[in-house]
Image (cartoon, helix red, strand yellow):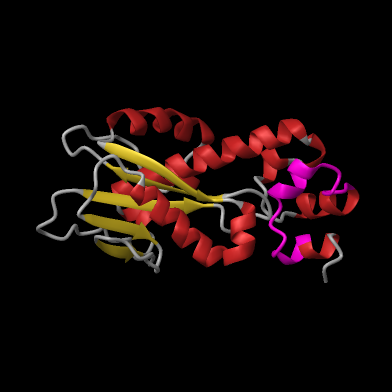
Amino acid sequence: MKQELLMYEYPAGFQCIAGVDEVGRGPLVGAVVTAAVILDPNNPIEGLTDSKKLSEKKRMALFPEIQQKALAWSIGRCEAWEIDELNILQATMVAMQRAVAGLAIQPDFVVIDGNRVPHLPMVSEAVVKGDLRVAEISAASILAKVIRDEEMKQLDTQFPQFGFAKHNGYPTKAHLAAIEQFSITQDASLLAQYRKSYKPVKKVLGLI
């Protein structure tokens, strides 16, 4: 029998809680995007859950509602070149720090999806499966995913042969076939989007 996921128990004594999540650790292309959200307990949002479990239509409906109803929200990111310099784990931590720092209201407690916590100037806690268990993290996951997916759609309009709108930069069979067939060095702006420390990209660039 499948065990039900327990909802997160908020610790006592904190007045302002922010949730943080990331999107885009696995893709070969683009930034890793993070969001931090402080929800308003007096203005609840129905339907929050892990962004990956929602349809695109539902995410697009929730996106402006989160922005309007949240007490504060912020986006943090690390670009492809930063990922290459830092590695994806450290870049994700930096992007999360940027998201929290960008909040108009400073939280006194931060919950982060996953099992790692970036260094922050306030108390923080990692929550495994937090995007399913913590409303603030669910909201952050939706903001981050919508923003990153829209960036991939924009890239797709510039370079439709690569299919970015379908795979969002992840190393699918179709994407790997495209980077073998079409040169990613054909345009400087396209090349800049690729994470050159990732093995499939190294391979097509002849770096391994």
Q: Point out the image quarter for the C terminus.
A: bottom right
- In the visual, does 20 lie left or right of 193? left
Residue name at image x 56 percent, y 58 percent: 25
Residue name at image x 25 percent, y 58 percent: 8
Please state the horizontal and vertical placement of residue 134, each as a whole percent of the image. Answer: 30, 52
Please state the horizontal and vertical placement of residue 122, each as a whole percent of the image. Answer: 24, 60
In the image, farthest residue toward the left: 13
Instruction: Please say if 150 is above or below 133.
Output: above
Residue name at image x 41 percent, y 63 percent: 114
Does the magenta-highlighted stretch encompass residue 79?
A: no
Res 204 quadrant in image: bottom right
Q: Point out the image quarter for the N terminus.
A: bottom left
Residue 49 seen in this snapshot: no
- In the visual, does 147 lie left or right of 36? right
Residue name at image x 35 percent, y 32 percent: 67
Please state the horizontal and vertical placement of residue 20, each as a whole percent of the image. Answer: 37, 52
Please state the horizontal and vertical placement of residue 123, each as a whole percent of the image. Answer: 23, 63
Tell me the magenta residue range: 182-201
* Figure disc tally: 0
- The residue nearer to you, when weighing 155 against 76, is 76
- In the visual, does 34 lie left or right of 160? left
In the image, farthest residue toward the bottom: 208
- In the visual, does 200 lie left or right of 106? right
Instruction: Please say if 19 is above or below 67.
Output: below
Residue 46 seen in this snapshot: yes
